[in-house]
Amino acid sequence: MPEPFPVPLDRKAVHVDVQPGGEIILRGSLYSSHDGARIDATTTSWPANAPGGASVDSGGLFDLEAGGFHVTSQNPSTHEVHAIATGDDAPLCALHDVAAPCLPLRLGVQAQSRLLETRDWHASLRGTIAIEVVDAPLYAPAAHWTSQAAPVLKTAGVGLLLALVAAGVAALLYRRSSTPAARLAALARRVRAKAQRAAPVLAAPLNPALDSALQALRAQRVDPLSPHGQKMANVLLRLESTLDEAELSTRRATEQQLADELARDVEIALEAAAEAVHAR
């Protein structure tokens, strides 16, 4: 297992040599002489004399989700964060021309929120955040081991190994699909599909807005656990309910129209039958 090493702060993103399924541990924090904030990998802790008093905000030194990691645990008191390399797209790594996965630094965002230049904000920070790379679980390198051992494995052994690999991959995919970000994206896609089936008067204004929401979620610009992310989820749920009601109303109107047409057809058939009887 590689030794922990400090994360350099003079880059926009730092590549981490870890395979999908592998874990990283980030320990330590930075203290700012500018406003007294204590910043670790994923949170910012404010002192008692800060506006609003002592508090902890989400948003630390790194944007881990946009760097190809999923946070599994964080402790603002000990400043220790555990995250798993997902193997998913890492838009900020690509933006900074760094191989994924990576640790995208948020110094520019933090400086902007304080109306400072990035270099001035950087100069106010004291401390170190170190990263430790933990070996990936067995299912991560299993496919590579299979290719090396294939000449000496019997068919039954290969089948068992592939089944174990499939189970590991299925577990990884399930974990990804159960994350708050995955659930919010699935909700947005579901509402988008319903909006496409809606009447043009509803679909015309909704589709562009939903497309923008999906793009923001794909680019991981929305934290599903933040107030903005929760507000988006509530809006999408209300919109879904509205679209369901509109679809039900349309269906009822269509059924009523069909019933009226069938009733008229029956009346016409009865009138024709009566005229035929009188004509005899």
Image (cartoon, grey):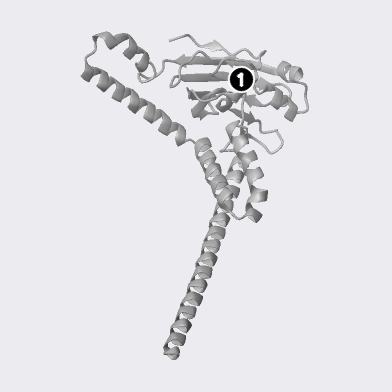
What quarter of the picture does the N terminus occupy?
top left
Q: Is residue 257 above or below residue 200?
A: below
Near-viewer residue (191 or 172): 191
Vertical side of 6 occupied by 168: above or below: below
Q: In this figure, what is the number of numbered marks?
A: 1
Is 248 on the left or on the right of 135, as rendered?
A: right
Figure quadrant of the C terminus: bottom left
Quadrant in which residue 119 is drawn = top right
State the residue position of label 1: 94
Q: Is residue 81 left or right of residue 107?
A: left
Q: Could you say whether the residue bearing mark 1 is in a helix, strand or loop? A: helix
Q: Is residue 56 left or right of residue 116?
A: left
Binning the other alpha carbons within 10 Å of mark 1 as few (below 14), some (14 to 19) or many (20 upward) gives: some
Residue 128 makes an appearance in the image? no
Q: Position of residue 161 (x, y in %)?
A: 28, 20
Amino acid type of the residue that numbered disc 1 sits on in the rendered structure = Ala
Residue 222: x %, y % from top left: 61, 35
| Towards the viewer: 52 or 13 | 13
- Residue shown at 46% from the left, 79% from the top: 269
Image coordinates for residue 248, horizontal then vertical, percent = 52, 61
Which residue is painted at 61% across and 20% down in the image? 94
User: Image quadrant of residue 154?
Assistant: top left
Residue at 60% across, 49% down: 235
Give how far across and how far down residue 103 sits, in percent. 58, 19
Using the rendered image of the protein, determine whether residue 149 is visible from the camera's viewpoint: yes
Front position in the image: 253 or 257: 257
Which of these two is toward me, 32 or 270? 270
Q: Residue furthest front?
A: 280
